[in-house]
Image (cartoon, helix red, strand yellow):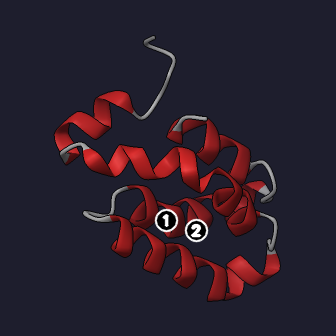
Amino acid sequence: TCIVHLIRHSLGYVPWKERAAMAALLRPVYTAPTVEAAEAALQALEDSPLGRRYATVAPAWRRAWPHVVPFFAFPPEVRRMVYTTNAI
């Protein structure tokens, strides 16, 4: 699981008119400087009205969390290059 595919999967649960808002809630999760900040952002997404309305999104991230956490070992500049497995 790569970040790009996880985002696409998550947005698949959300209607078009609310995808931008959900993407804005997801962005702090995968751009967080630390794992702890990412977990806090994921909790904030889960507790938000949009997160409660589309309750399948946060659990999808939690299931994939063991695959997401290794990305935080890289500096932000490198993370942007390895968010997707498409280049591989």
Q: Position of residue 82 (x, y in %)?
A: 36, 29
What is the quadrant of residue 43 in the picture? bottom right
Q: Which residue is located at x 55 percent, y 59 percent?
A: 23
The answer, for residue 48, to whether it is visible in the render is no
Q: Callout 1, which amino acid?
A: Ala
Q: Is residue 55 above or below residue 30?
A: below
Q: Is residue 31 left or right of residue 55?
A: left
Q: Is residue 14 above or below residue 88?
A: below
Q: Position of residue 2 (x, y in %)?
A: 54, 35
Q: Callout 2, which amino acid?
A: Ala
Task: Mark 1: give few (<14), some (14-19) or many (20+) Cα within 10 Å.
Answer: few
Is residue 59 or residue 44 the one in the foreground?
Answer: 59
Is residue 56 or residue 67 the one in the foreground?
Answer: 67
Callout 1 touching callout 2 (CB < 8 Å): yes
Task: Mark 2: give few (<14), some (14-19) or many (20+) Cα within 10 Å.
Answer: few
Question: Which residue is tagged 2?
Answer: 21
